[in-house]
Amino acid sequence: MNDQDYMNLALQLAESTKGQTSPNPMVGSVVVKDGAIIGMGAHLKAGEGHAEVQALNMAGGKAEGATIYVTLEPCSHYGKTPPCAELIIEKKIKRAVIATVDPNPAVSGRGIKRLEQAGIEVITGVCKKEANQLNDVFFHFMKYAVPFVTLKSAITLDGKIATVTGKSKWITSEEARLDVHTYRHTHDAILVGIGTVLADDPSLTTRLPNGGINPIRIVLDRNLRIPLHSKLVAGEEAPTWVFTTEQAPDEKRKELEEHGVTVISIKDFSIRTILQQLGKRGILSVFVEGGAEINGSFLQERAVNQVITYVAPKLFGGKLAPTSIGGEGFQEVEEALALEMIDVSRVGDDVKIISRLKEE
Ligand SMILES: Nc1c(/N=C/[C@H](O)[C@H](O)[C@H](O)COP(=O)(O)O)[nH]c(=O)[nH]c1=O
């Protein structure tokens, strides 16, 4: 095994914790000595031990003179736990291989400098691209302080999300609908418009065979039309936050709050303001499940980072049948939101396309 192999193992450890470390990044670490793995670990939950601590604890006394592989630069600041850079030095590690540096400008490069000052050989950039892709949500949040937005559509071959009479169950296959739940599990929040609530009465919970983490359920509802008997209000499986305007009826606000709903009033009812508010509340990733008007608002404000499109081999036709993105739309081709398709795969009878905003 070479540096790349050990770093890939550390990346697999990190990836295995997807969905459970927010607001922290996913990090994996492996400690190797004389060609043998003597320690490995991952950061499992915010507030708990960092990956390096887990791996070095497992290595114990054998760590002296070993090499440590970490998918993200070791921390050098006293957060909820002591700095990993100090622990690596204390354990007399000889060589540190790091995939990517910390994006946080406040600490970027400090951990590496600390290790080098202590005479440890530091190699950076091994599997850097994979390590950055793994924590794209965390890096995005560090840079912009607003959540990374994934927009999901389930459409027919002719781009419809429902028939002309509004029927939509089901367009995509059971496997594709189950795949959607893996995104609910890994996102901090799921967001829909009041139109979807009134049409589908969704629960927006994560229903995976082996369970999963429920995202916070967010509804954009200017006039507080959400019914008190809706699953999002009556159901207690996950928090529900409703964004509304100051003109919304106080009576309804109080009733919703009595049902445990968090009502957030904002002056400027724009996607940008809503994302800023979510960022302030520690939401790093949002999964937008529509409907068409909400998707249209996100597109109009160009507040989309990733698009997951499920295409079913069906044709609905109908000039008035809704497509996945409503709103005003752009006038010119040049205004299009330019993405790149980074993955196309089959899920059940359907095709799944993952597209990302082009790196600026
Ligand atoms: N109609 C289809 C979808 N429709 C999704 C709806 O807009 C809404 O998000 C769901 O009804 C959510 O409900 P719940 O949380 O499961 O109770 N989504 C899909 O992936 N495929 C389809 O065919």
Image (cartoon, rainbow, N blue to C red):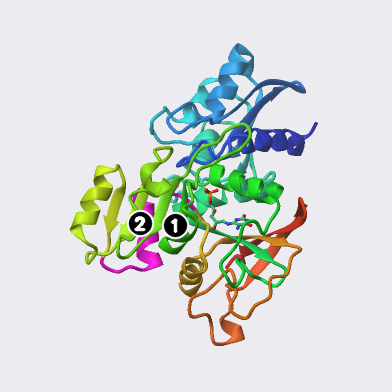
Residue tagged by mark 1?
197
In the foreground, 245 or 93 = 245
Q: Is mark 1 within 8 Å of ligand 1?
A: no
Q: Nearer the viewer, residue 300 or 127?
A: 300
**Residue 344 in which image quadrant:** bottom right
Query: Measuring 69% from the left and 36% from the top, which residue is drawn there?
Result: 7
Q: CA distance from mark 1 to mark 2?
A: 7 Å
How far across and how far down the image is residue 280, in percent?
Answer: 34, 52
Q: Nearer the viewer, residue 357 or 27?
A: 357
Q: Residues within 10 Å of mark 2 (few under 14, many from 20)?
A: many
Which class describes the residues within 10 Å of circle 1: few (<14), some (14-19), or many (20+)?
many
| 285 inside magenta stretch | yes
Residue that extends furthest to the right in the rendered view of this protein:
1
Give left or right: position of 128 versus 294: right
Q: Residue furthest front?
A: 165
Q: Quadrant of the N terminus?
A: top right
Ligand 1 position by quadrant: bottom right
The stretch in magenta equals 267-286
* Amino acid at pointer 2: Ile
Task: In the rendered view, tell whether residue 23 sits above or below residue 68.
Answer: below
Q: Is residue 92 visible?
A: no
Residue sitting at x 75%, y 39%: 4
Q: Quadrant of the C terminus?
A: bottom right
Q: Secondary structure at mark 1?
A: helix
In the image, what residue type sits under mark 1? Val
Mark 1–mark 2 contact, CB under 8 Å? yes
Residue 127, image x, y percentages = 69, 45
Q: Secondary structure at mark 2?
A: loop
The residue that appears at 74% across and 36% down in the rendered structure is: 3
Task: Give above or below for 207 relative to 90.
Answer: below
Query: Which mark is on residue 226?
Result: 2
